[in-house]
Amino acid sequence: MAERAAGPGRVGRRRALDEAEVVDAALRLLDRGGVEAVSVRGVAAGIGVAPNTVYTYFPDKAALLRALAERVLAEVDHAAAGSAGLPWRDRVHALAADLRARLLARPGAVGLLLSAPMDGPHALALGETLLAVLGEAGLAPREAARACYLLIVQVLGSVALEVAELEEGPVPAERERVAARREALRAVPAEHFPRTAAMADTVAEYISTEQFTWSIDRVLDGLTAVRPAPTGDAPGTDGTGAPGTGTPGRGRRS
């Protein structure tokens, strides 16, 4: 039964809510104004209840933001990354590309994930999927854990720089955003910044899918260059399978 609008001196009947409805209201605020727009009062107003009602589900704003981050990460598709029929690199790319696509479709979520701890079940599931794939790629557990963090930082940082250039409203198509960057780069004075001016087309594509894919590939190249050999103590390990902790200056032999 809906809560009656409460005016001065009037108390409405408590509305039957659930946690999901509160988080959905927070998500609408996030989509309209970014993480700065999310507040307990705003959520309460959005669903027509008093702020104290929201506090019965979340003790503070930080808890609400954590739940909101979980709501966003729940949308990430793990199916391709979990497919044993795909090469491990393709699985990492599939997961990274899906996360990027979700965040570009909801730009306010980037600031949310950078400001709220990613420690809920869906965040842990994302890490667990990456750890499994990286383990299958031959990385020792400690190196896989570090690589997992590196990849998450790469994706979030890349998308954060993309959305920082966006105006409010629907996200333009990638080709339009690249074209706008290319046009702006024409104003770069070649006499002062000759290399930037010469590479204007490439710089314009920093926000492109091609650049994103290239970046993930370079990270994966680096990770596979230092992974330990399948058996025995490979050069550059400490004997426990963790690469990079042995004799300095000794890397993988080609």
Image: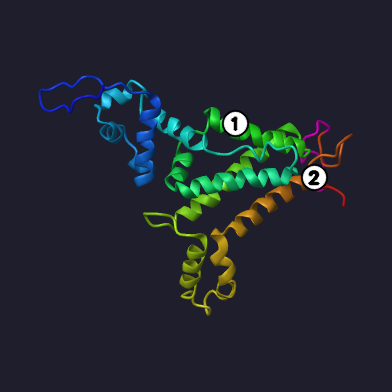
The span from disc 1 to disc 2 (Cα, nearest Å) is 35 Å
In this rendering, would 18 be left or right of 74?
Answer: left
Dot 2: few (<14), some (14–19), or many (≥20) neighbours within 10 Å? Answer: few
Q: Nearer the viewer, residue 234 or 1?
A: 1
Mark 1: give few (<14), some (14-19) or many (20+) Cα within 10 Å.
Answer: some
Q: Position of residue 88 (x, y in %)?
A: 73, 42
The amino acid type found where label 1 is placed reads Ala
Q: For the residue marked with disc 2, what is the amino acid? A: Pro
Does 247 appear in magenta? yes
Reading the image, the residue beneath label 1 is 125
Q: Which residue does the image show at 16% across and 26% down from the upper left?
A: 6
Q: Which mark is residue 248?
A: 2
On whether residue 15 falls in the magenta region, the answer is no
x, y percent for residue 27: 39, 38
Label 1 vs label 2, nearer the camera? 1
Point out the stretch of residues depicted in magenta.
239-249
